[in-house]
Amino acid sequence: MLSVKSVSRLIGRRPVVSEVSFDMAPGEILAVLGPSGSGKTSLLRMIAGFDAPSMGSVHLHGREVSAAGKVHVLPEQRALALAFQDATLFSHLDAVGNVAFAIKAEGKAARYARARAALHDMGLSGMDGREVATLSGGEAQRVSLARALAAEAKLLLLDEPFGNVDRLTRLDLLARLKLRLTSGLGAIIITHDAADAIELGARVLLMHEGQLMADGSYEAIRSGQCGPWARSFLVSEVE
């Protein structure tokens, strides 16, 4: 599905991502972990097509979509769905309309029916007419995730999707997302919490200072198979 080949990104002369490579199979779940400033979001932005890699290339579904200095395929043409820590909702649409916006089904009635079903899957019902300004932080994030899941993309990109919600909401959203991901939808989740990776059963990519330090299961990294730094970081995050 996805192949990232020796990707680097420079801001001025400073490398924020340095020669990162990995492959991702269809339906796989990856959790990108690492300290603040380790390059996680910069990597995701290159995969999404918002930024071009300074060096290296990104391939999606067997097609080169970005390469050194160029974005060949725009984000909206990559069959991706995205959700961020700050729920970026359209203020002129109500909650249902925000989700329906991502759905390509013909006819407003069909799109809105699917939007309501997606919201229900995220724990929200009766959202017709609810202006986004009236939503709590947790409700707004549920709407954002529902919109991403309703888009029927082949790959879901999530950047700290649980960062602004309380612990109980986080656990509920993790459980709901995990259930949805069993359908074969691939996902890359940036998170600062290793517990998210454990709950989702994700393969872990561990980054530090722009470099990919470890790539494997949580159990493999924790057992030291990917080196002492990776094990130390992961253990400290969980404990």
Image (cartoon, helix red, strand yellow):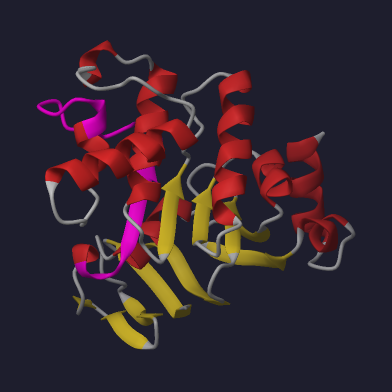
Q: Where is the C terminus found, in terms of image quarters?
A: top right
Q: How many marks?
A: 0
Asked if the stretch drawn in magenta spans residue 91, the answer is: yes
Residue 67 seen in render: no
Q: Residue drawn at (39%, 40%), measured in percent from left and top?
A: 118
Q: Residue furthest top?
A: 134
Q: Position of residue 219 (x, y in %)?
A: 84, 58
Report the side of 140 relative to 22 (left or right).
Answer: left
Report the side of 178 relative to 19 (left or right).
Answer: right
Q: Is residue 130 above or below residue 178?
A: above
Q: Quadrant of residue 191?
A: top right
Residue 11 or residue 40, whichever sits in front: 40
Q: Residue drawn at (71%, 44%), measured in percent from left and top?
A: 199
Q: Quadrant of residue 112?
A: top left
Please provide the residue range marked out in magenta.
Answer: 77-96
Q: Residue drawn at (42%, 63%), measured in percent from left and top?
A: 155
Residue 106 or residue 231, whichever sits in front: 106
Asked if the stretch drawn in magenta spans residue 119, the answer is: no
